[in-house]
Amino acid sequence: MRPVMQAVLAVLVSAMPALAAGDERPRDVFARIDEIDRASLVMTVETGIVPPALGRAIAKALDQVAVDAAQPGAARPDDYLKIEPLITAIAGPDASRMHAGRSRQDIIPTVLKLEERDRLLALAAALDAARASLLDVAAREARTVIPAYTNGVQAQPTTLGHYLLGYAAAMARASDRLHEVWARTNLSPLGAAALGTSSFPVDRRRLAALLGFDAPVENSYDAGQLAPMDLGLELTGAAANLATTAGSFAQDLYAQYHQTRPWILLREGALTGPSSIMPQKRNPVALYSLRMRASDVVGGAMAFTVMAHNVDSGMPDYKRNQMIPPAQTLAAATEMCKRWKAVLDGLVVDRARAADEVAADYSTTTELADTLQREADVPFRLGHHFASELVTYGRSHDLRPADLPFDEVKRIYAEAAAAPGLPQDMPKALPLTEARFREALSATGMIAAAKGLGGPQEAEVTRMLGAARDKLADDRAWHAAKREGIAAARAGLDRAFAALAASP
């Protein structure tokens, strides 16, 4: 490459907010159009639409326009019709031949695709980072006994590791959705022209390859007039789905944070905020900022649905301003995942307090009924009724499960066994020793007794944690491969453009 070309590229790389290694900031619209122009110029020269000599002149003009736009305070137009005069002012009116077989009707959707593609990958990376933090906490707290809730009421004990692995599974599904929508995102509209292509020999496959797309959107009407709508709905829908999970997680933590003696808190500092008047307050800033960003994502998805709903095909409602809801919603979802990670990294767990909250309620009585059926052949409904009567007795006497007098336990069982509808020869004596009764009614005993796939027992938590980490590694490899593919395409475009500009 000639020194002058190296200098030009160096200026462009330093000036444009490009996606360099580890940099997931999106390029602006001007940079996107410049990239499209460079790919179009390479293709039009290769296909003979633009003569090589004119191609060289246009290449120099493109470089000059890009360098000028990179200067501090310089204008960076976001409309091709405002950029073309800058090119023709340098290379002459013939430079407009580069636009042969194109229209803003395919340029704008291509700008959208380039932006959505980068936003999608940024979201995937942020989601993977949040999952990694979640799995770290799950491993650390694999045996931490906590209360779990259904219908807002303490239901059964589980472990914090088991609970978090449930969210890891939901996050993995969100990752899968991003991978699936990538196949439809990474298709190029360029070369479709207004909607029916043109009489020029535009090579749409070459344009797609130069821009790092997997292929063109095949139908030229679909490319610019339909695909931007349904893809936008799919992208924002995937983001909203993830946001709903993030909001649920935030609300779960709020359920504890609101308590006088919560068992889970946030590390004080950047994640919490003081009250302006009440010195005792430690407001959960990280939690409500996570939830608010999740609301922004859901709101963005709803806004795009409204814009896309009930309009004629090809209308600008869902394409206007070039960077509207799909890209913005993906960006908000990315920020949401970063905030989610911050919450996970700052969790403070009081294991003793969590165990005490479980021990204070009767959430283990399901296992007592199961133990009676499994070990003493007691009908489940009898065991369930007996356990329910135990709860009534214990709560009315302000007793914890561990404090129930065993003589009263045996009396309550005898009365339950004598209830109408049961066989009269049903044994009235509780068929469990006191030690076995206490073990069955303990949180650790209930968790250890779990046998089912995906349960909270240690062996299953360990297995699921390993599988979740393997899945995360695969997803990160997918992300790296897509980034490398885009980088390789951009490098290829730079080489092809430089060769065109340097040709004799």
Image (cartoon, helix red, strand yellow):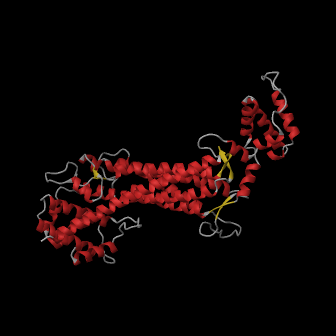
Residue placed most toward the observer, 213 or 195: 213
The quadrant of the rendering that contains the C terminus is: bottom left
Residue shown at 81%/30% (left/top)? 416
Q: Is residue 234 left or right of residue 141?
A: left
Residue 103 rendering spot, x and y as whole percentages: 22, 56
Residue placed most toward the observer, 494 or 57: 494
Kindly tell me whether residue 97 is visible in this rendering: yes
The quadrant of the rendering that contains the N terminus is: bottom left
Residue placed most toward the observer, 355 or 84: 355
Residue 425 rendering spot, x and y as whole percentages: 82, 22
Q: Residue furthest right?
A: 407
Residue shown at 73%/57% (left/top)? 352
Q: Is residue 271 left or right of residue 425?
A: left
- The correct choice, above or below, for 203 with respect to 5 in the image is above
Residue 316 rendering spot, x and y as whole percentages: 31, 53
Q: Is residue 357 left or right of residue 129?
A: right
- Quadrant housing residue 387: top right
- Number of numbered labels in the structure image: 0
Residue 321 rendering spot, x and y as whole percentages: 34, 59
- The correct choice, above or below, for 298 with respect to 384 in the image is below
Kindly tell me whether residue 154 is visible in this rendering: no
